[in-house]
Amino acid sequence: MKKLVNIKPNALKAVFLIILIGWCGFFLARKIDLTNSDIGRHIKNGELLVTGDKNIRQKVLYTNFYSYTNPDHPFVNHHWGAGILFYLTWKQAGFAGLSLLYIGLCLIGFLIVFFIAWKESSFWFAYTTSIVAVPLIGLRSEIRPEMITYVFGPLLFWILLYYRKGRISYIWLFILPILLAVWININTYFIFGLYLIGIFWIETVIACILAKRKKDKQGEQLHYEKAIFIGLSGILSFLATMLNPWGIKGVFYPFIINSQIEFSVLELSSPFLLKTTGELPPGFESYFILLGALLVAFTLLIFKPFRKKFSFVIFTWGVTLCVLSIFQARNVAFFSLFAIPLLAMTYKAVWAIVIELSRTQQPYLTLLLLNKRFLNLSKIIIIPFLFALMIAFNSYFVYDYNNTRGVGLCDNVLDALAYFNDQNGSGRIFNDFDISSYLIFGLFPNEKIFADHRPEAYPAGFFSDVLHSAITSERSWREIEMEYDINSIFLTNEPSYSKINLFVNRRIQDPIWDLVYSDKYTYIFTKNKVHNY
């Protein structure tokens, strides 16, 4: 009987963990809409870098190679490593393999942060936080280079945290330069790896100074040694980031990458602004719950009774993520991933102080809070409630209204490319911002594009003065149509894109252009010229 009692709690946790992994996989498994994602361009990057000659590789890395409007404009292809990874995966396992790669890497990152939260607080603190965070991680379900960040970020955090706590050897720190050398060539979020090393080093230096003031020789020596090793790993990691095709320029590129954006991009807008304008995507409601819970916890730790549980790293990293997510919606998934350990650890600390205070001031409250029946009843109520609440917030995906759940490509998404190629489409193409990677994947090198997702790959003013003007102004369109000798138009069919829809309506009424193909993803127009088809 004693053996059964010992096994039962662990078995229960195992069942709940399996449910949680399934919950995570459920939100991550979304089909790829190739017309509205970057993955097509990444695959083409990888293909050319693997199979192309030196001249081709140089153009892919350093120039705006896919555009006929600005083919020689200098460009820092900072995600080239992701292209190789995606291409090799796609070559061997197709788009379904890419979906499974994304799901697998995100699950690894999730399990790392869950493990940290579990060990640093409790299984149930970690579990309840994860229920709320997982749908937000799934909102960033497009296959992107930053999925590497969802693994490398938690892994780096785990190494630094556990070394700082004395649970692993300093040898683990020398994995960090390897991570950074790979990370910088895949995603600009590598900069947060250096940032984390920096704040862990600062915390260790502060601990060393405090130990010296208390005349704690042993503590001072211990923190001093840790500061040396963390500092050394930080220097080596910074040097490792220089192992990219652009050297020091590549290291500082994340600070300037968004400086040339001349138009509103949904993912670069604040969730609060999107909520005000009614453009907030479904499912973001739980973000405000996580953000509020974390800010409340950090506020409590500032007050005197809770101050002894204050952690410089947890507070600084948490506030940084809060600020990043407040200013840009694209950071919400990254914020939510780390909210799992940060919330669990912070509220565990707050809970411990509450219990300590209640023991001296309200002993009967302590008995209630520590009562096993009360705690079990709380779990029975809170966990199903959170699951139900998240299902309500994410009903659009839970009930799969758009038939997007699963792996691989969305149904019939390649039909427009097949039609264009079957009709031997030729001549210069005008396209909108979103559909560019789709065209690069399906038409390059036979056809180049007008513009794509990368504002930094084009001269200042191009998107506002050329692309945007062509879509919104009929006079500008006529000038650009003649200047670039445009023969075909490929556009995204997205009901929410009002400006593009108005442009489509004008072209339908334009006798010079024929709408030759449309489906739920795209529109194709061709000019009334004999040589088109």
Image (tube, grey):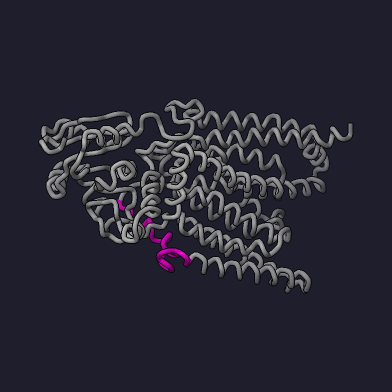
- The spot of residue 36 in percent (x, y) is 36, 39
Q: Is residue 452 visible from the viewing direction of this image?
A: yes
In the displayed structure, does residue 447 sit left or right of residue 200?
left
Magenta stretch bounds: 242-262
Which quadrant of the view contains residue 232? bottom right
Looking at the rendered image, the quarter that the C terminus falls into is top left
Which quadrant of the view contains residue 130? top right
Residue located 60% across and 67% down the image? 233
Residue located 56% across and 32% down the image? 390
Give 53 or 252, whichever is nearer the viewer: 53
Give 2 or 387, whichever is nearer the viewer: 2
- The spot of residue 333 in percent (x, y) is 51, 45
Q: Is residue 254 magenta?
A: yes
- The spot of residue 423 in percent (x, y) is 21, 33
Q: Tally the numbered discs.
A: 0
Question: Magenta region's main secondary structure?
Answer: loop
Q: Is residue 266 visible from the viewing direction of this image?
A: no
In the displayed structure, does residue 266 sit left or right of residue 115?
left
**Residue 284, above or below 456:** above
Residue located 68% across and 34% down the image? 16
Residue located 30% across and 61% down the image? 74
**Residue 426, above or below 305:** above
Looking at the rendered image, the quarter that the N terminus falls into is top right
Residue extending farthest right: 1
